[in-house]
Image (cartoon, rainbow, N blue to C red):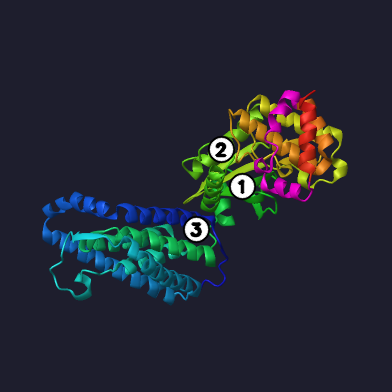
Amino acid sequence: MDRHIPHERSPVDVLRAVVTAAALIILILATVLFGDTLVQFGSDLLTGIDAVPYRLLEAVVVASRVLSTFGFVAGLVAALATRRFRLLLTLVVAAVGAAIAFALIGSFVDTEATPLVVVGADLGQLTDRDYPTAIGLAVIAAVATAAAPWLPRNWRRLAWTIVAAAALSRFITAPVSLETVAALVTGSLVGSLVLVALGGPVRRPSRAEVEEGLRGVGVDLASLDRAQVDARGSTPYFATTSDGSRLFVKVLGADERSADLLFRAYRRVAPHDLGDERSFSSLRRTVEHEALVALTARQMGARTPPFVAFAAIPPDAFVLAYETIDGSSLDGVELARFDEATVAAVWDQVALLRRHRVAHRDLRLANVFLADDGEVWIIDFGFSELAASDLLLANDLVELLASLTLAIGPERAVAAGLAAVGPDGLGTALDRLRPFALSGATRTGMKQHPGLLDQLRNEVRAAADR
């Protein structure tokens, strides 16, 4: 039974829904505009299939249909036998939704040519030309997509092997058309939307898996507990090692990867240039880059927590561990602790990063840490860049100026910035002091104080003109 399994809506499903929706729109447009031409081209391209022995093709079709039928039925029976009622509800909704969706969409992709193969054997439904139908194929794809969060990796592969077998059978025996592709895309889209609406089992690594991963790279843990801190883009933990050292642990998996890709896609289509680089080819490269920037910044003299470990958690998650600093982030510090020395120390750290062209890219007060001994630390280089452009460095100034202004006012924030980076440095931020260049948290804060961003802009302009 799955009633005690925690469920959530995952960015993975949102990303898949966005991608498949875009693919379906492109496919429909291509069919409406060039459908007959594309189908005829495909038919001509595949005429060479006649060279394959007929009996072999017939055997492939029958075997594909047997595999897809047996696998589909066996999967539903297994879900019933294990009493996974939430999974069954999800699959039923996905199946019905896919059938309705393709019934509406199918008319846009009904261009067709001659079938590649006509099966001569008589094995009942298994040799019928229209088995599986396009709607049936969409249902199978939707069910495989919706079931994926509940399945281990090997079973997910088997599920999509079944989908591929059904698609191959229809591709070979049905009249040449774009229906097969449209059915697969429609099914995947509906399955993803159902998961977005109903949620699926949590796919983040468990605490035991995180502990095992860290122990595998030589970090012997005595305890590991979820951290209730502002850690966008990761699952945070506080850990204690067997020798009493305290660590801050970040876990990043498929959810975080998908959320990051969606965030970057949104920023790419935004009307303003935010200076983003291309996203990395994999989550591993993303996490390794964060570790590299943190190590580089510390080597350059920035005060950032020492990096301790990097670990992989099969199949697709990674862990970063840093030494813990006793204290709190500046967004949780009372106003009395924002003395001139503290504000100057914040700017000193940012000025050092600027000299080495390291862009933090998320300089909210949540990522500036005030230790119990009064020292200022910069944390979380998850979105950072080395050899940064002038635009990225200017964005850092904008974010820090705005977030500090919310805490101590524009006069003090700008005065400290002027002392650290000079009038020319502040001048680079002037054109970027707009809501679009701010983080969501800072932008929300500014909305609660109408006119404050304009005051900050005037202060910066006056300082830059000195």
Res 31 quadrant in image: bottom left
Name the N-terminal-most of marks 3 and 1: 3
Mark 3 residue crowding within 10 angstroms, few (<14) / some (14–19) / many (20+): many
**Dot 2 amino acid type:** Asp
Q: Can you tell which mark lies on residue 276?
A: 2
With respect to residue 356, does 371 lie above or below?
below
Q: Can you tell which mark lies on residue 13?
A: 3
The part of the chain drawn in magenta is 421-450
The answer to whether any part of residue 302 appears in the image is no
> Real-space Cα distance between discs 3 and 1?
22 Å
**Residue 385 pos. (x, y %):** 59, 34
**Dot 3 amino acid type:** Asp
Res 121 quadrant in image: bottom left
Is there CB contact under 8 Å for labels 3 and 2? Answer: no
> Real-space Cα distance between discs 3 and 2?
24 Å
**Residue 362 pos. (x, y %):** 66, 40
Q: Which residue is mark 1?
A: 250
The answer to which of 262 and 384 lies nearer the viewer is 262
